[in-house]
Image (cartoon, grey):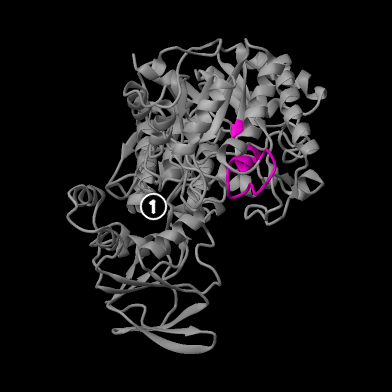
Amino acid sequence: MPTLLTPIEIGGLRLRNRIVMPAMHLLYTPDGEVNDRFIAFYEERAKGGAGLLIVGGCAVDEYSGGRELIGLDHDRFIPGLERFTTAIHAHGALVAAQLYQAGRYAHSFLIGRQAIAPSPLPSRFTHETPREMTQEDIRMVIESYAAAAVRARKAGFDAVEILASAGYIISQFLSPITNKRTDDYGGDLEHRMRFGLEVAQAVRAAVGKDFTLIARLAGNDFMPGGHTNKEACVFARELEGAGIDAFNITGGWHETRVPQIPMEVPRGGYAYLAQGVKQAVGKPVIACNRINDPALADTIIRQGRADMVGFARGLIADAYLPKKLMDGRPETIMPCIGCNQACFDHLFQFKPVECLVNPRASHEVEMPLQAKTESPKKVMVIGGGPAGLSAAATAAGAGHSVSLYEKSDVLGGQLILAGALEERSEFLALRDALVRQAVAAGVDVHTNTAVDQDLVASYRPDAVIMATGGEPIRPPIAGIDGANVVQAWDVLAGRVDVGNEVVIIGGGAVGIETAVFLAKIGTLDAQTLKFLFLNQAEDIETLENLTTMGIKRVTLIEMLPRLGADIGFSTRWVELSLLRRYRVKAKTHTKAVRITPEGVMVEHDGAESFLACDTVVLAVGTRSVNALAGVIPAGIPVVTVGDALEPRKAFDAIREGFAAGRALG
């Protein structure tokens, strides 16, 4: 049995395994009250076998962050929370409430007043300036933490987690960046720790010695002039003395410019933060951030780097991840790919969290697990991209006889292109998972097969799902048919080569990823970089240049005023940082006027100029491919999904495919 599945004790609790679901804002509780949607979401994760579910943030007072948080700041919330904990316990999981106070990260329009913080310094997250906390404010907040913890215990929670990471109020007291106080709560590290320690002491005193307390810590703030793992370890040791039973280790603040959770972060890349804290304390430690692979999680635990592993988005992506491991079916797990399209991007739009790879996430009430149909149909799915694979797997899983036809020799569609860039390779993991899911469900897969009238007539389907995808647009630019003009799709697929001077027309997601893909050609790979660094073969500056300066000189032009307009808020800044890192020249408000064998004439602010290049790459968008509508005989129901309906994101394609497969009955 994997160590990940073995029991562990924290405080007075015995967890059935070492799989933890850390707290995430879900925006399922708009009035602070738990509801059927919230309960069903977490109940499914309890059924799926997780050992500990941590829910939050749970507001401890009126300054915490707004009513969309889970309410723990008043006794009226206790009955609803008790209904929730009872539902979770019925399935063998334990559950903790995360005590949340945002400090300067609270938006005034959400809390109806000016935020409070250790010092009145502007927040780059809210673009507002908080009010400096008085001694009375400090006492009030500490007492609010304690009172909220008591409510959590009364409501049936097994533990509470004190949030001391991500740049929230305890982090703000800890950091010299945000704490400029001259009283007993500011100055050196000992005094900056005082607020957090008093919170822990007050909570411990309020709930008693027999109730489990967890602390969520940033193993490194990743803020210039802020705390590193060294200070985190000092604080953890002090918290251990104050009564903390376990430590949940993450990294970064919302303001940090070091990516924490998108797919660009290597799997398990921040496990070293938990490892550092574990070496400093004697209590169990949870490792988090981009650990989406159970085998990796098990290795981290077996090696003694942590005692438990947090699967936050991993359990959104597949609620039954633990159970599938227990049943010896790890290959059926649908992995989180760190895309952020429907979780963190939704949060920044104040929309409830959903999931690209799991269309049922947040919809468990209206979409219960589907039973086998009593009226199986013969279903033809045309197209093996994400929409087609999702539709086929869903329909076959419901008991229909499904055949999928893909005209190329490989399944996955645009996921293959999306995963061509090394930093975005998780899209290939998604492609593999969708294929495995379809095959396991019994889908009869045909590649290298173009659908025509004869094939439809011989198969005689009861229903057709049209998932024929899209194709790249070829805009009406003079010279567009020149031999030096290629499509970004062909570049990413490795079907064409380019010269050393390249101009890319189109600064959306595809254009940006193609620019980085080309700019990285000739740079050092990670293994070579490590070898040269450890052997001191080159100095740091030379290694940095060799790692970021390739042999292609790439210019990206975009008509719109901003690049990456089709990329979500939580990842766009990461994509743009890659352009800068690999020295891609980017020009906005710039239109391609005509293409010649020598380059591109462009217009910017009414003035024309010429960009010399060897190759012009087109990345100007996608149009639907739906030429097969006429080959389906009248009377056979046809549902069109994904880019064949309208070009959008993978989230929409997978969701529509799922809905089409489910709607068959």
Q: Secondary structure at mark 1?
A: helix
Residue 414, position in %: x, y? 39, 52
Seen from the viewer's position, the closer of residues 148 and 53 is 148
Chain part drawn in magenta: 163-185
Characterize the magenta stretch by its predominant secondary structure: loop
Label 1 crowd (10 A; few <14 / some 14-19 / many >=20): many
Q: For mark 1, what is the residue?
A: 418
Residue 460, position in %: x, y? 41, 38
Q: Is residue 419 visible?
A: no
Residue ID at (49%, 78%): 590
Residue type for callout 1: Ala
Q: Does 179 appear in magenta?
A: yes
Tell me the quarter of the picture where residue 163 sits: top right
Q: Which quadrant, please, contains the N terminus?
A: top left
Residue 446, position in %: x, y? 31, 40
Seen from the viewer's position, the closer of residues 414 and 242 is 242
Tell me the quarter of the picture where residue 514 sits: bottom left
